[in-house]
Amino acid sequence: MARRLGVLAIVLLGAAYAWPMQGGGGTPNAQYALVKALENGTPRVEQSLQELGDFPTRDLVQIDGRLYSNKAPGLAFVTVPLYAVLESAGMHVTGDPTRALWALGLVGTVLPAVL
């Protein structure tokens, strides 16, 4: 019985983590720009930032005239494959990143938290 309650608690916790769809901000947008850039084969985020439109970030560093996300790349590397699948499936990946960030967050944050 206790084991079933523990599993139920983990499932409910995962559902609670997955439920909210939050908009972007400085940190999520920088991570998302890095994911988009890595999927295109480069760590430079200039093109990715242009695709975000009115959803900018200041979490950047400029080296030799090139822009890079100042976020650690681990989360981006983990979520690049899912991003490629979402893009191939026709998900809107330019402009407002809210839906794409939510989907990537399921794999990059909710799944590890539940495991």
Image: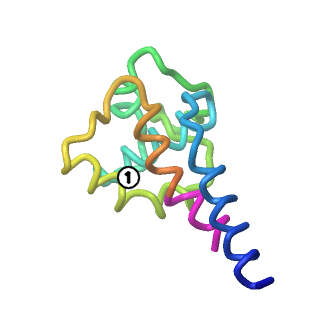
- Look at the image and tell me in which quarter the C terminus lies: bottom right
55 vs 61, nearest the viewer: 55
Residue 74 at x, y percent in the picture: 57, 62
Our reading of the magenta stretch's main secondary structure is helix
- Look at the image and tell me in which quarter the N terminus lies: bottom right
Circle 1: residue type: Leu
Q: In the picture, residue 2 is in which quadrant? A: bottom right
4 vs 10, nearest the viewer: 4
Highlighted magenta segment, given as a residue range: 107-115
Query: Vertical placement of 110 versus 36: above or below?
Result: below
Query: Vertical placement of 102 versus 74: above or below?
Result: above
Q: Name the residue under label 1.
A: 38
Residue drawn at (42%, 36%) of the image: 99
Tell me: 112 left or right of 78.
right
Query: Vertical placement of 39 versus 67: above or below?
Result: below
Q: How crowded is mark 1: few (under 14 residues within 10 Å), some or many (20 or more)?
A: some
Q: In the picture, residue 20 is in which quadrant? A: top right
Residue 32 at x, y percent in the picture: 47, 41
Tell me: 109 left or right of 55.
right
Residue drawn at (39%, 57%) of the image: 80
Query: Vertical placement of 12 versus 17: above or below?
Result: below
